[in-house]
Image: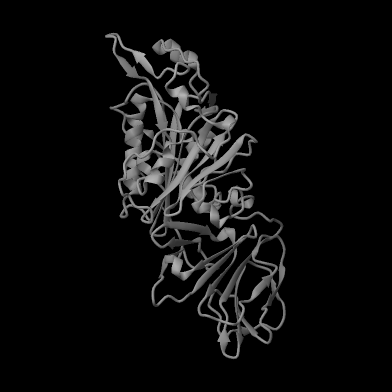
Amino acid sequence: MKKALLVALMGLMTIITANAAVDFQNITITLKNGQVIKYDASQLDHVTYVGGEFGKEGAVGIKLYITATSSEDYLYSQITSIVYDTQESTVAAPTFSPTGGNYSVAQTVTITTTTSGATIYYTTDGTTPTTNSTHYTAAITVSTTTTIKAIAVKDGVSSAVATATFTINSGSTTDNNVNANWHEALYNSADDHDDFTSSRATCGMAWRLEYPHISTDANSTVVVHATSQYKISLSMEIDKSQRANRWSCFTMHDGVPNKDVGRYGTWRSDPCLPSNAQVDTEEYSSGKYTTETTNLDGSRTVLFSRGHICASEDRQSLKEQNSHTFYTSNCHPQYQQHNGGIWGRIESKVQNWGYSSSFRDTLYVCKGATIADVKLDGQTVSGTIPYSEVKTKFDVTLTGTLVIPRYWYMAVLCYKNGTYHAMAFWSEQINSNCSSTSLASCAITIDELERRTGIDFFCNLPDDIEDAVEATYDSSFWNP
């Protein structure tokens, strides 16, 4: 295994705490897809700038910690402008035309305010504008990548600071997130506490860092389950034609604490899926799908169990949250020996990371099992176990329709102290607990997992960071 690469983001990580001394009232973020998201300071526990504020060299993104509930991430490559309201003001913040973004040629930028008689001041060096800054009198020509910050002032009263970055890529409009979901997906602030099903292009949460690139397959649908208190429990991609889960993803951080609520709920159909996409819960227990095998002594042993993808132990903050893991859309047939053996040990390791404040700020997890062909050692092989193989090995006749994955995996991204780390686990599903198998031998890079599965994980990261953290993994950091 290669020596790991530690990716340190340029600039210091700046934290603003929302308390009596807070220097903003609201934060308004405008995304490149046209969506506008507003936060009031009363919603926020604190705000972290990853690598610096918007527009600074080496700056990567902004993390907003919603009081006692959740953490939300925005990459600056997703954003055209950010407005910070520093006071109750009757003066409207300036706007830019065109808006910030990626352009192939120089842009002529005009700055306006809807407040009649206000004077606009601006900077292009990343500093906060004041009345001593450049007075805006005519359009600005931007021929190289530039961040413009502006305020409007009238009768001694200043507006909020408006910020926009214009990235000029001569001869190209390629940005730094070429495969990001948010190029197509819309943001919907209501989605983070509502259950919903959507297509790829309308998935309101697909910009989040835990999401892999959503499949373009017409059979793909995205399901999100959420609670009003802790927002998103888990997100899933379902192949409707196979009635099978492609992956489940979620985050772990201090805003979603481990309250150890236990296993709450029973296996049941997913209310967000139509009947023709549902996994038949009876197939796990009826004559259509035998889950037990007869041993030589005549005893019966469970062969397959309902294998959680997002585990019950992954969602322990709220009973409702935990119950979402018991939808059959979040499981696959799994040899119980594998489920309670090597896979269980891998899950415990990731849970230890996810519930440890000293290990991570935020852990982004995507878990799944193969339901299509995979590539191993340059060869294309089946990612599923045929019923005939089960019959041959165990003399158990299966007459159901469930897909049995041959391989299980996890992709894990950790953000801590201004740095991202990533790694993956891969395990072949066999009827053994693999007690002598070390977790380190199951650890691979994200790049290798992507080669095997064909799925682009953590696609919403800026490409330079994504490329670096996915190429290797730091065994001394993860210590699997």
Residue positioned 49% across, 16% down in the render? 387
For residue 109, which quarter of the picture?
bottom right
User: What colour scheme has been applied to the protein in the rendered image?
Assistant: one colour
Residue 42 lies, in percent from the top left, at: 44, 69
Residue positioned 58% across, 55% down in the render? 188
**Numbered circles on residues, count:** 0
Location of the N terminus by quadrant is top left
Residue 12 appears in the rendering: no
Q: Is residue 65 left or right of residue 147?
A: left
Location of the C terminus by quadrant is top left
Q: Nearer the viewer, residue 363 or 105?
A: 363
Residue 201 lies, in percent from the top left, at: 64, 46
Residue positioned 51% across, 71% down in the render? 26
Q: Nearer the viewer, residue 12 or 89?
A: 89
395 in relation to 430, above or below: above
Residue 135 lies, in percent from the top left, at: 64, 85
121 in relation to 423, above or below: below
Residue 476 lies, in percent from the top left, at: 32, 46
Q: Is residue 350 left or right of residue 224?
A: left
Residue positioned 65% across, 73% down in the render? 95
126 in relation to 135, above or below: above
Residue 248 appears in the rendering: yes
Q: Nearer the viewer, residue 175 or 400?
A: 400
